Amino acid sequence: MANKRDDICEAALHLFVEKGIASTTTREIAASASTAEGNIYRYFRGKDHLADQIFEICAGRFHRALQEAAGLSSDPSARFSAIVSAVFEFAEAEPDSFRFVLMAHNTCELNPTVSAETALPRDVFIDVVKAGVASGQFYPLDPLLVTGWVVGMAQKAILFMSAGRIEATGAQVKADTIDGALRLVSRT
């Protein structure tokens, strides 16, 4: 059973994704979590601290999903394909978490003060790209730039699918995105 802190985080996550952090009030969060507004301050210093905590939770979930996918192979190309696939799977399994992490990276509204210990999804991509470059399978591209390109590709594909703008199946869109991402980085 979830506790009140978890209820607040879940309510805030949904509202932040739907309305944005700046447009969401603590009163709305409390109402959505079926709690008193003062309980938010029992667990968090304020709305910004709550947003930072939610970012760390969501980023950690996303990181674990990518890390698990990357661990299925030692071959950089297979690992790269697996983590691109995992982006789609995470977006489907945890749409609010996915959207919130991307919002953190794509807007100035959320600028979390992430601790050095926070596991970030991009770290998995960077490690896999570095391994691919070191093995000679990938072009010597900046790993962070590649991460941005590939996550951007996946994000747009997911957005187009959810808006009904793509007639292909989800499996085909995922396969095409993986193929495009591999073509972007692969020397072979």
Image: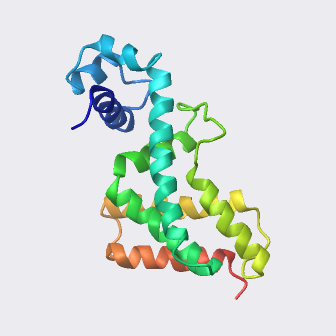
Q: Position of residue 76 (x, y in %)?
A: 64, 77
Q: Is residue 157 visible?
A: no
Report which quarter residue 136 is drawn in.
Answer: bottom right
From this view, report whether residue 40 is shown above or below residue 126: above
From this view, report whether residue 171 is shown above or below residue 120: below
Residue ranking furthest to the front: 1
Q: Position of residue 138 (x, y in %)?
A: 72, 77
Image point 76% across, 80% down: which residue? 135
Q: Position of residue 113 (x, y in %)?
A: 61, 30
Front position in the image: 174 or 130: 130
Left or right placement of residue 157 versus residue 6 in this view = right
Mark count: 0
Q: Is residue 160 visible?
A: yes
Left or right placement of residue 100 versus residue 92 in this view = right
Q: Position of residue 38 (x, y in %)?
A: 32, 10
Of the 4 image quadrants, the one containing the C terminus is: bottom right
